[in-house]
Image (cartoon, rainbow, N blue to C red):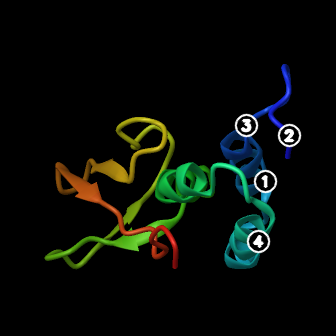
Amino acid sequence: LGMAAGNPSPRTIASRILRDAPPAQLPEVLAAVRVLVTEDSQGVEASIPGLLADAHAREYMAVEVPGAHCRCLLTPDGQREQGSATFYDPATRQLLHVDTGISPGS
């Protein structure tokens, strides 16, 4: 993964691979990305939670709302900003910080 002029960074490559991964295979794809990325591995690791939050929003994942007996549908429009694991739940009118289930380095 060279860094010559015009080549994308390892973080950009990892982002593209995770973005295009089938939802059911996200953990396996993430493991493969970690094996392949040697340059800027700390930068890639730091970006993983945000990349996973983006993937969850893109796939309209439903999550349990803490303290409520309902679920929230994660959507790109409900995501506070791209790469953020914070989403707005209009039913409960609160911001939810979603645990992507995978922390850097795990």
- Amino acid type at mark 1: Ile
Q: Disc 4 or disc 2, which is closer to the eye?
A: 2
- Amino acid type at mark 3: Ser
Q: What is the number of the mark on residue 9?
A: 3
Q: Position of residue 57 (x, y in %)?
A: 53, 52
Q: Earlier in the sequence, mark 4 or mark 2?
A: 2
Label count reads: 4
Q: Measure how far apart labels 4 and 3 are at the Cα level.
A: 16 Å
Q: Earlier in the sequence, mark 2 or mark 1?
A: 2
Dot 1 corresponds to which residue? 17
- Is 106 on the left or on the right of 87, as rendered? right
- Is 13 on the left or on the right of 55, as rendered? right
Q: Measure how far apart labels 3 and 2 are at the Cα level.
A: 8 Å
Q: Position of residue 98 (x, y in %)?
A: 35, 63
Identify the element where label 2 is drawn: loop
Of residues 84 and 75, the one drawn nearer to the viewer in this rendering = 84
Q: Disc 3 or disc 2, which is closer to the eye?
A: 2
Mark 3, residues whose alpha carbon is within 10 Å: few (<14), some, or many (≥20)?
A: some
Q: Examine the rendered structure and indicate whether residue 45 appears above or below residue 106.
A: above
- Amino acid type at mark 2: Gly
Q: Measure how far apart labels 1 and 3 are at the Cα level.
A: 13 Å
Mark 2, residues whose alpha carbon is within 10 Å: few (<14), some, or many (≥20)?
A: few
Dot 2 corresponds to which residue? 2
Q: What is the number of the mark on residue 105?
A: none
Q: Earlier in the sequence, mark 3 or mark 2?
A: 2
Identify the element where label 3 is drawn: loop
Q: Position of residue 79 (x, y in %)?
A: 40, 43
Of residues 87 and 5, the one drawn nearer to the viewer in this rendering = 5
